[in-house]
Image (cartoon, coloured by chain):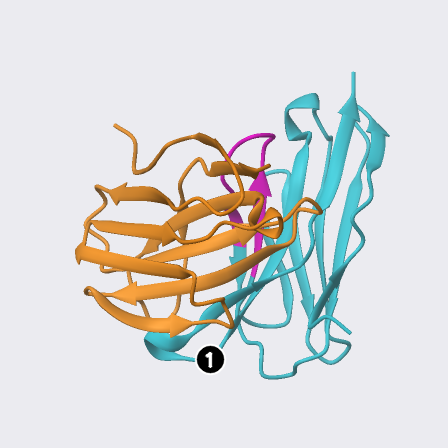
Amino acid sequence: DTAVSQTPKYLVTQMGNDKSIKCEQNLGHDTMYWYKQDSKKFLKIMFSYNNKELIINETVPNRFSPKSPDKAHLNLHINSLELGDSAVYFCASSQERQWRREQYFGPGTRLTVT
Amino acid sequence: QKEVEQDPGPLSVPEGAIVSLNCTYSNSAFQYFMWYRQYSRKGPELLMYTYSSGNKEDGRFTAQVDKSSKYISLFIRDSQPSDSATYLCAMIWGSGNTGKLIFGQGTTLQVKP
């Protein structure tokens, strides 16, 4: 069974379109994240949710809107896509612990904006 | 200046070599230090984590942290072609559920048979 799954795996779209990426985890974790990895492999957090509540909201354009319908799902909607949004988007999940903070990553969604 | 600096490589070594991967950081508030491995077209997976300065060993992998120098390393002994991947160092900033991982850029390693 896949622990963290994302759909779609690949997304090619034109500038100005609106698109969504979905993420689901079956690990029973209470925290989920969205990361963006650029072409230089630099991985940066965008958002985190804990028990469906937005906890971290990095400096991300408000064209990006995350939504967590329940603890196991975290979706990312992107409005008015721009060329610079082309990247790999990773969903991740974790269980909060005092001493350890392993995050389980999904396989990524490769977004190409043309 | 980025908070976490990591040479992106690529680093190419022959099979069986000892590999040394390094990161430096600027924020002394970082407490937990991790290494993630990312195979091509896959998500990162946790390889090792440590909290204190010193060494931590797990099989062929050794993680080393020097907080006084703000320097962390990952050593791979007897490297194998299956170790070919991108290795990302990561550090935790903040506490509780507002803590976040700050990643280095990743070093791409190729181990040639």
In the rendered image, the quadrant that contains the N terminus of chain A is top left
- Percent across and percent down for residue B60 are 64, 38
Query: Furthest residue to the front?
Result: A16
- Does any portion of residue A79 appear in the rendered image? yes
Determine the residue positioned at 23% across, 54% down: A29
Query: What kind of element bears circle 1?
Result: loop
Q: Amino acid at mark 1?
A: Gly
Instruction: Find chain B in the image and tell me its colour.
Output: cyan
Determine the residue positioned at 40% across, 64% down: A47
Instruction: Find chain A in the image and tell me its colour.
Output: orange
Horizontal side, residue B76 vs residue B51: left or right: right
Q: Is residue B43 magenta?
A: yes
Relative to B40, does residue A81 appear above or below in the rendering? below
Determine which residue is flagged by label 1.
B94
Determine the residue positioned at 23% across, 45% down: A27
Determine the residue positioned at 58% across, 77% down: B30
Q: Is residue B79 magenta?
A: no
Query: Furthest residue to the top?
Result: B113
Q: Nearer the viewer, residue A105 or B47?
A: A105
- Does any portion of residue B45 appear in the rendered image? no
Relative to B46, does residue A50 appear above or below in the rendering? below
Q: Chain of mark 1?
A: B
Residue range of the region highlighted in magenta in the rendering: B34-48
- Percent across and percent down for residue A32 are 31, 57
Relative to B112, does residue B106 appear above or below in the rendering? below
